[in-house]
Image (cartoon, grey):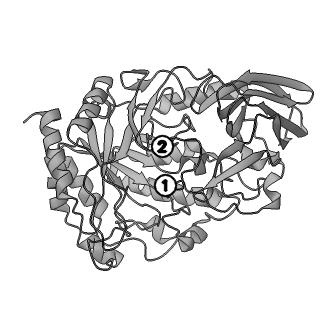
Amino acid sequence: MNLLKTCCLSLIFAASASAKPDESNEDYAPTVIPKSAEATAPLTIDPKEINVVAGNLGRYGSDFTNNFANYMNLWMAAKGAGPRQIEWTLKVPEDGKYEIDALVKGRGSRLVVSCNGKRQNAEVEGDSWERLSLGALELKAGENTLKLEIMATERFFFDALELTQPEVKAALLKDAQAMRVQPDWFKDAGYGLMFQWTNRATPPEGPIKPWEEKVNDFKLDDFVDMVESTGAAYVLWSVTWGEQYISAPLKSLDAIIAGRTTKRDLLGEMADALEKRGIKLIFYYHYGYDCNHSIDKDWMEASGGYKADKTELYKNWMAIISEIGERYGDKLHGWWFDGGQRYYNCHFDNTPADQGPLSVPFKELTLAAKSGNPDRVVAYNSWVKPRLTEYQDYFGGEGVHAASGLEDGTFQNGPQEGLLAHGCFTFERKWGHIEPNSIIAKPKFNLKKPTAMIQKAQKQKFPLSINLEMYEDGSVSPDSVTLLEQLREDIRGK
């Protein structure tokens, strides 16, 4: 809901931030687009909400390519200079004026949006993804044809238009800002450790243990000792990653699908143990959508995740997240929700556009995430794109090493305006150790680089999450620990 054009802001990514899907990166490698004749059905506009009119839901010609990667629509890519266009049919309950913002990338490209005989235009000025204001247009009660025309000087990439009535936009922004928290512990943390450990975590050799046995055998004391030895101020821990298995007894998950929880409350034990050491805890959550690295078909069918109308999925999501939040209360300090694009565009999977909401009810989801502790920080990972909702506290920062344009750790302008800055990156080779019969790779850094990165981030008051691969038993690479213990001395002192 940014009211301004993108201002000066730079982010440095550990991985490629290219606007083209990366075939070498399984998280963003191309996949086959599901064919759905109904995908271009009329979109129902809600006068009281932000309406996400995504590019893949419109009518477009062969000069646009749907960049469909990792089982989702990432964005539309233009071929050649143009002109080219995308059209949508909008069903509107009553006459109204709507401000229009576009999520785009492509310096020098000129956009014209038109409806009911009126036109607005703007030019893309930045080199990165931005939210660009296109002015306002009148929509009439009934069906409207909204057209976006583009003239590009270079490559052009388009995600979605956001249509919002001006008074609604202002009220939602004020409401979201009132919910935000900006705790000093987060800004002063310096660095923490991130782990993608789930049912899929593998041992150095041999088969994976059954879920209950794996959780029972997790060496929690050794894990907490290791974290403390590295000087990490917090742990960013995966509740799930890909498949929906959670290392705690949860009634909400059991009610949806059997065999996915455990008798041991490992999450609770971890929260208690870390609190005793003065180490904060943030949970990472992946709701189980299809990925190149994981498909959990049984869960997605049981939860409503494959339906065009994903309302059932969101209700199940909120039940799980709020139960976790209520149980761990003020021992749980944050959430990091992956796959922000799948929240922003509910038809990322090319399901019929006239069924269900266009975007998730972000306010309701964020309130569920803050159940039991309203001071929790919340992020929806937008990867290289602008923030996808104002109902969050900090930037997910996937792959980010550094940022600028900050004041007291907060973005003052640009695509992440208003959010606390944060970055996370892999320390070794991958986010999680899920390859069988393999050893965790050595750190890809020497001591000098991460020390310099963290010292710079500390001056700007934003934390960096260092992701370590982890074996099935909860152990990590000794080489990584040794380097991080040296890092601790450089950053924290002896």
Is disc 2 surrounded by few (<14), some (14 to 19) or many (20+) residues within 10 Å?
A: few
Is 426 on the left-hand or right-hand side of 11? Answer: left
- Counting from the top left corner in percent of width and height, residue 260 is at 43, 72
| Residue occupying the point 37% across, 43% down | 424
**Residue 375 shows up from this direction:** no
| Residue occupying the point 41% across, 25% down | 410
Amino acid under disc 1 = Asn
Is 178 on the left-hand or right-hand side of 272? Answer: right
The one of 78 and 377 positioned closer to us in this rendering: 78
Q: Which residue is mark 1?
A: 25
- Counting from the top left corner in percent of width and height, residue 179 is at 48, 33
**Residue 363 shows up from this direction:** yes
Are the two marked residues, 2 and 1, in contact with CB atoms closer than 8 angstroms? Answer: yes
Quadrant position of the N terminus in the picture: top right
- 92 lies above or below 339: above
- Counting from the top left corner in percent of width and height, residue 64 is at 76, 45
Q: Which residue is mark 2?
A: 16
Q: Secondary structure at mark 2?
A: loop
Is 114 on the left-hand or right-hand side of 65? Answer: right
- Counting from the top left corner in percent of width and height, residue 230 is at 17, 46
- 260 lies above or below 459: below
Quadrant position of the C terminus in the picture: top left
The one of 81 and 191 positioned closer to us in this rendering: 81
Q: CA distance from mark 2 to mark 1?
A: 9 Å
Amino acid under disc 2 = Ser
Name which of mark 2 and mark 1 comes first in the sequence: 2
Q: Secondary structure at mark 1?
A: loop
- 338 lies above or below 487: below
Is 477 on the left-hand or right-hand side of 383? Answer: left
Name the outermost residue toward the right: 117
Quadrant of the rendered image containing residue 209: bottom left
